[in-house]
Amino acid sequence: PKAIEGLNEDQMIEIAQRCFFTIAELMNQKKQTIMSLFKEVIYKKSIEGEEVELISPLDFLSGLRQLGIDDLQTLDYTCLIKVLAINDEEKHIRVNDLIQILEDYGITEQDSTEKGLLEEQKFEELDKVSMVLMLALTDYLIKAKIPLYDLFGDVIYKQPVQVDDKQLHVDLINSAQFFDVLKGIGINTEEKEHENLKLFLCLDPSYPDKLLVKKIKRAIEEFAINEELRAFAQQCYQELVDREQLEEEPDGKMESDPRANLGAEKMEGKDKVASSDDKPGDQC
């Protein structure tokens, strides 16, 4: 389309992100979710053997008008569809894709069945290493200004899960790949995987190697805004550093410790930790 001639992919994404911010703001004001806004126009279609829920471009535009977005520019609409559409030929929008994107802007879609998978996370169950790993991951995302799905996108996969009498398709990450990604950004321990954190983030204790993305996301949101939790994680870090110093060998070398190399930028006091004034919603 002429509207996007001369724009590269990054520019189109930036325009779409501004639109998503406005959409999320209005949805919050009007207490709407994707399902409540588009429930009358969502339809199902089989794509590559999987039945998916879709919204047509015209119905999507109509939903935006219901929110109060009457003056959407052609360029903005074109960039939105370019980002959201299944492909260049099939312009229709996957409902799950739209839900995932808007979750990064604070719009959560959760029914009573799904809540069964997301029992209240008890952070007191985290040991010191897990506390510091989660704080380091949270601060990395805030500093880099990227959403969780951008960091782990290549290793996230969907799997059907039976909850009561309903089947849900949930986003999962294999635990080994989760810790590989952490290692890749400089957040790691000498352990291949930290068992305590796996059990905290897993779909179910019976499946400790399947980490539920929504649990990871919820934990990150809590570490980003909960000052008491952040302070305790910083205290855990300092205690682990002190322990390393006590275990220092006479020749000046440290004994092996699973906390070694925790973060490429080791947190040394609060000045190494991202300000909690930065919110996950700022990560476009």
Image: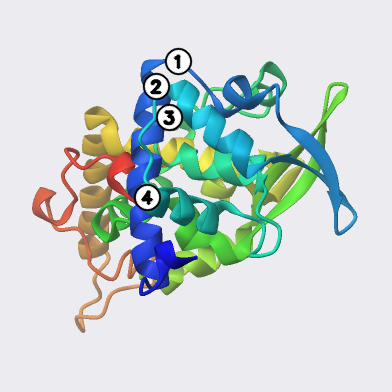
Marked residue nearer the N-terminal end (3 or 4): 4
Q: Is residue 63 left or right of residue 40?
A: left
Pointers 3 and 4 in contact (CB under 8 A)? no
Q: Is residue 276 above or below residue 41?
A: below
Mark identifier at residue 124? 3
Q: Amino acid at mark 4?
A: Gln
- Residue holding disc 1: 31
Q: Is residue 153 above or below residue 233?
A: below
Q: Label 1, label 4: how many angstroms apart (C-alpha)?
A: 20 Å
Query: Residue 253 location, x and y as percent?
Result: 25, 80
Q: Is residue 258 left or right of residue 246?
A: right
Marked residue nearer the N-terminal end (1 or 4): 4
Mark 3 surroundings: few (<14), some (14-19) or many (≥20) residues within 10 A: few
- Residue holding disc 2: 28
Q: Nearer the viewer, mark 3 or mark 4?
A: 4
Marked residue nearer the N-terminal end (2 or 3): 2
Q: Is residue 1 left or right of residue 43?
A: left
Q: Quadrant of residue 262?
A: bottom left
Pointers 1 and 2 in contact (CB under 8 A)? yes
Element under disc 3: helix
Q: Amino acid at mark 3?
A: Glu
Q: Nearer the viewer, mark 2 or mark 3?
A: 2
Query: Residue 184 location, x and y as percent?
Result: 43, 73
Q: Amino acid at mark 1?
A: Lys
Residue at 54 percent across and 24 percent down: it is: 33
Mark identifier at residue 17? 4
